[in-house]
Image (cartoon, rainbow, N blue to C red):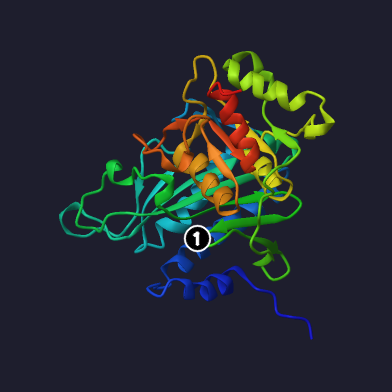
């Protein structure tokens, strides 16, 4: 008899034994995230047949053009949590200027709910028109008890304070990777049964790899230390395993997912005129840092550990260097002038 597949729901319920005080709330939140993923995956599969390709003509809070699928994915996350109140009090997204408070209202302007969900609804959305891989990123934080009023200040937490984080990858298969602080686990959507099934438990990133991911078209905008690091990776030196192979998809989730299996390093560094980088801390850099560190890797700005940064705004940007321990440490050495 074949063993029964381990679904996402079963896996989470079994892992509650790691937390004696668990109430089952986390499993409900993850079930809603999985539901959003299934809806987005379905929309992705129909992208060429329904009117979801191209731009909406709108600009988001980041000053970026909004793709139709960006908006549709964001609306999907909002919808599955807005009408499932009681646990998630606030939603923070790349596509929304301000946090959306969705918990059921209580007296005195307060709201019910213990958690905040941060998410990038569709990372790499410009790839959609070319039928390339895209993803979603999510981060779960516990927020103050509902004795406090709704406030963005209450949402400004470090990556180390995350309850859980993960991402979804929409490609040849739909993949969900998550961690609640006890390792990293990968699930693949089985369309035949409509469930995410465990496909790779306890992912571990190699301590060193042979791949680097960066948009080299921005080379002339990088600080000298970043330029020297990438030059070092591309030099020929068989004794140190160089040159590295360049792999850059334009989708942060896809590039980081590759590193989890093969090792290496991803960079979205600071640039001239963009000292804070481009990626958002709370719903891109921090959740991916949580995942990669749980898998044995590192994540840094080049100067500071990503997980230690105390955000000043929910849309704060940071440079990001993420991947295998040895490559991230080497990048820090170049950026900080030790090499």
Q: Position of residue 279 (x, y in %)?
A: 52, 33
x and y, in percent, of residue 138 in the image: 51, 50
* Residue at screen point 79% across, 31% down: 242
Q: Position of residue 229 (x, y in %)?
A: 65, 24
Where residue 211 sits: x, y (%)?
74, 37
Q: Residue at x 34, y 42 (%)?
A: 156
- In this view, the residue farthest toward the bottom is 1
Please state, as top left, top right, bottom left or bottom right, where the C terminus lies in the image: top right
**Residue annotated with mark 1:** 180
- The answer to whether residue 52 is seen in the rendering is no
248, 37: nearer the viewer: 248
Left or right: residue 99 compared with residue 264: left
In terms of depth relative to the viewer, which is nearer, 84 or 57?
Answer: 84
In the displayed structure image, the side of residue 339 where residue 308 appears, left or right: left
Q: Residue at 52% across / 36% down in the picture?
A: 300
Q: Name the image quarter holding residue 114.
A: bottom left
Residue 70 visible in image: yes
């Amino acid at each position: 008899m074949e063993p029964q597949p381990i679904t996402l729901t079963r896996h989470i319920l079994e892992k509650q034994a790691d937390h004696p005080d668990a109430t089952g709330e986390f499993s409900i939140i993850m079930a809603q995230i999985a539901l959003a993923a299934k809806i987005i995956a379905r929309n992705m599969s129909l992208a060429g047949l329904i009117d979801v390709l191209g731009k909406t003509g709108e600009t988001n809070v980041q000053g970026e053009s909004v793709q139709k699928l960006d908006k549709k994915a964001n609306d999907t996350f909002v919808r599955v949590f807005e009408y499932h109140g009681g646990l998630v009090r606030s939603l923070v997204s790349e596509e929304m200027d301000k946090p959306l408070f969705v918990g059921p209202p209580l007296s005195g302007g307060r709201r019910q709910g213990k958690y905040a969900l941060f998410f990038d609804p569709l990372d790499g959305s410009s790839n959609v028109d070319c039928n390339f891989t895209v993803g979603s990123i999510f981060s779960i934080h516990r927020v103050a008890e509902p004795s406090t009023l709704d406030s963005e200040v209450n949402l400004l937490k470090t990556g180390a304070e995350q309850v859980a984080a993960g991402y979804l990858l929409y490609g040849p298969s739909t993949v969900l990777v998550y961690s609640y602080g006890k390792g990293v686990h990968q699930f693949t959507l089985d369309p035949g049964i409509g469930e995410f099934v465990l496909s790779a438990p306890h992912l571990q990133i190699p301590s060193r790899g042979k791949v680097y991911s960066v948009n080299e078209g921005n080379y002339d905008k990088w600080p000298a230390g970043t330029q020297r690091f990438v030059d070092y990776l591309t030099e020929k030196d068989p004794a140190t395993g160089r040159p590295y192979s360049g792999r850059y998809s334009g989708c942060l989730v896809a590039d980081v997912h590759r590193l989890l299996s093969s090792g290496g390093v991803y960079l979205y560094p600071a640039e001239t005129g963009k000292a804070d980088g481009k990626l958002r801390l709370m719903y891109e850099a921090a959740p991916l840092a949580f995942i990669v560190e749980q898998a044995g890797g590192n994540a840094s700005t080049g100067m500071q550990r990503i997980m230690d940064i105390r955000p000043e705004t929910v849309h704060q940007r940071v440079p990001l260097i993420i991947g295998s321990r040895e490559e991230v440490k080497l990048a820090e050495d170049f950026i900080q002038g030790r090499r």
